[in-house]
Amino acid sequence: MHICFLTNEFPKQGFPHGGIGSFVKTLAAALVKKDIQVSVIGINYTPNEETEVVEGVNVYRLKKSTVKGFSWYFNSKAITQKIIEIHKQNPIQIIESSELGFAFISKIKDIKYIIRLHGGHHFFAEGENRKINKWKGFQEKRSFKKADAFIAVSQYVKKHTEKYLSYNNKPIAYISNPIDTDFFKPIHENEIQNKIVFAGTVCEKKGIRQLIQAFPFVKKEFPDAALEIYGRDWFFADGTSYIKMLKEKELPKLGGLVKDIHFQGVISYSNIPKAYSEASVCVFPSHMETQGLVAPEAMAMEKVVVFTKLGPGPEAIEDYKTGLLCDPHSPEDIAEKIIWFLSNEQEAKTIGKKAREFVLQKYALEQIFKQNVDFFKSIITQYIK
């Protein structure tokens, strides 16, 4: 079997990537270990074309088009040409992308196209209470029509996507994103007392502003608390930095507490476990998620996690048993949950152990790998019939 993933986010040293990139890297490496060929095609971060083999995965990073207003067309054309080239050399059975990925990709006979619902434009527009961008909405609908099957990473993303987009009576499976529980494993000796860790894109929908606003409440109870923020910056439509906005508008309100809030910037995938291992509590108060990788990654390390009670939060955490759920719009509630963990060390240890057990049961790589391969095979077989 030959699987091809379409994504620009496959991790590259020195460059930021999101959850989709982490997911593809984890699943692709697992597929290769089971003698399944994997290719990844995407547009490069730099203005040149590169090909490399990463843990047995063939990664093709294509040169980005610079034609203003038509880069989407030329980028899609380049991806289609690369698919054709690879397919001629070694036939591809499955191509997978996220929601918008197939909009301008030409379909090839005998290849089955699967969309994995990581959270598309319609999904996040609803979650963030904003209008649908007509151009992006058009692309998503066009992409969905080309798909032969779908995979939802949570029940929540499935239900809320189908409010706006049709699955066109095509097969759909519910398969969680996998967590590499050998990579994300307990490292207790690194823990630093009262250190709070956030990881993710530093933007409004990740709840980082409310977490910063919660910090003074935590400091009142635990004066030595520190907040470490790991992740890439996000930029407004006018090009201004979200982190700069936080530093200019939110941090000055905290006075002397600012010295204990540290923006660590982009962190490489290989260093994420170390960042989690130093935490007393990991906090991810997202306003909206499809599944979220950071919470189960930290949970796999027996870290106590404060996660959002919105969206798929309750699918990932059972409150006061495998973690704590918070109202991500309430700094007071976020602070209350952090303080509870820091004040109840013994209960926190018990919750941390149960959290890893839960991740092993629901997100273990071997189990998720099998679910994916079984679904891929069912789609191939169905269409052959």
Image (cartoon, rainbow, N blue to C red):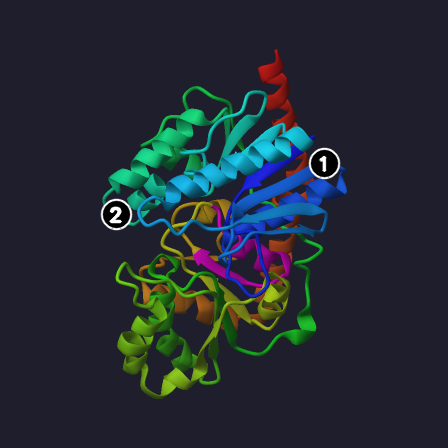
Task: Give SS at disc 1.
Answer: loop
- Residue occupied by mark 2: 129
Looking at the picture, how far across and down is residue 160, in whole percent?
36, 36
Quadrant, the N terminus: top right
Give the mark nearer the N terminus: 1 vs 2: 1
The residue lying toward the viewer, choosing from 231 and 344, is 231
Badge 1 amino acid: Ile
Would residue 359 be visible to someone looking at this image?
yes
Instruction: Provide the residue span drawn in magenta.
Output: 291-307
Left or right of 314: which side holds 55? right
Looking at the picture, how far across and down is residue 84, in whole percent?
57, 31
Q: Is residue 259 above or below residue 195?
A: below
Would residue 153 be visible to someone looking at this image?
no
Looking at the picture, how far across and down is residue 112, in whole percent?
56, 25
The residue lying toward the viewer, choosing from 309 and 293, is 293
- Residue occupied by mark 1: 36
Task: Give SS at disc 2.
Answer: loop
Q: Is residue 48 above or below residue 331?
A: above
